[in-house]
Image: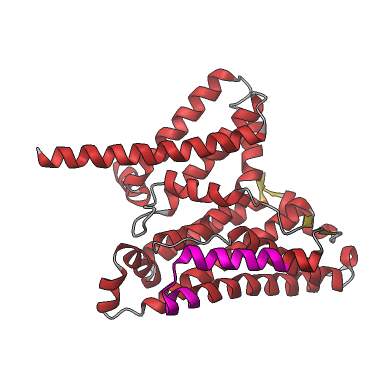
Amino acid sequence: MSKLFERLKDLAGPEMAGPSMAFVAVMLIFGIASPQFISAATFGSVAFQLPELGLLTLAMLLPILTGGLNLAITFTANIAGLTLAWVLQSYGGADAGVGALILGVVLALAVGAASGVVMGLVIAFTRAHPILVSLSMMIFLRGLGEFLTRGGDISGFPDFIRPLGHGSLLGIPVPLIVFVLCVLAWHVLLTRTKLGFNTTMIGSNIEAVRYSGINTRKVIVWVYALSGLMCSVAGIIMLARFNSVRVGHGESYLLITVLACFLGGVNPFGGFGRVIPVFVALIVLQLLSSGLNLLGANQHLATAVWGILLVGIMILRWMAGHFKILKNRR
């Protein structure tokens, strides 16, 4: 039993302390405030709502680990979703077959990865700041999507797509299964592959990594390509969830993905972070939102609370670092 505990501790790392305490606090506060909070209905709602935000957070995680940022995640997801929607519409809309779905998914994944590759190339070869590059990509994708859809949405998809967004397998929501598989893939990538190791090293000190002989440009391009690929997965799930696609879907998720990463112990300057604590942080945020909804609070209040939480996390981190410096001086 002790070996299993140590193994789980190694997987999660010291970053798990913050999300764990936040999870306990949310469960206690809302469990006392609302008797309906700790129920199957609440956790079922969280299970269906978590994947959309979670997949976009995974897309944000890799760039943050390199010391960068991808501000184009939501619009990349929507462009990928629009790509799938256009393919389905071209092959009959609601009457489209499975072959059209497979073709649309492949093209959607390719579009997301391509947007990431473009950002990665610009960042890697021009050394422009990732915020400026991803902001430019965000504006481009938003304008392109608005132009192509004329500000509207696309709907009318085959019925066999609905289980991807609303179905269950052995009682577990299909979107959650997809998300958990992506979490495991990201965990293996960061802990068992050379790319994952180089990603965190670049976030720690890119010049030292460059002088050690590692092709940092190649790593950065891969990081943003994988980020775009994960955005595509999110866009496909969002299409199935909403049964429609438009450019502005999930736009409010952008800053919340950053919050989830910080709450999960990821260093905002790169070089340090794990997937499992971020996964727990996402659960905490969704439970917080569900708890506020049960208390009759507006969804906008939940967004405001998330913002306050982000400020609080930054203050607590500053205090922890300050006290650590004082302790070392003594």
205 or 128, which lies in front?
A: 128
Q: Quadrant of the C terminus?
A: top left
How far across and how far down the image is residue 310, in percent?
A: 46, 40
Residue ID at (64%, 23%):
295
Residue 92 point in image, percent of width and height = 90, 70
Q: Quadrant of residue 84?
A: bottom right
What stretch of residues is rendered in magenta?
121-144
In-front residue for pair 150/313: 150
Q: Is residue 106 left or right of residue 243?
A: left
Q: Quadrant of residue 89?
A: bottom right
Q: Is residue 132 rendered to the left or right of residue 21?
A: right
The magenta stretch spans residue 133 = yes
The residue positioned 36% from the left and 38% from the top of the image is 315
Q: Magenta part mainly helix, strand or loop?
A: helix
Q: Is residue 138 left or right of residue 146?
A: left
Q: Is residue 110 above or below residue 157?
A: below
Left or right: residue 16 compared with residue 150: left
> In the rendered view, would you say 330 is above or below 89?
above
- Tell me the quadrant of the picture where the N terminus can be found: top left
Q: Is residue 68 visible?
A: yes
Q: Residue at x 49, y 35 (%)?
A: 308
Q: Position of residue 60 (x, y in %)?
A: 51, 58
228 or 309: nearer the viewer: 309
In the rendering, at what x and y percent does residue 243 appear?
A: 79, 54
Q: Is residue 284 visible?
A: no
In the image, residue 108 lies in the stretch drawn in magenta: no
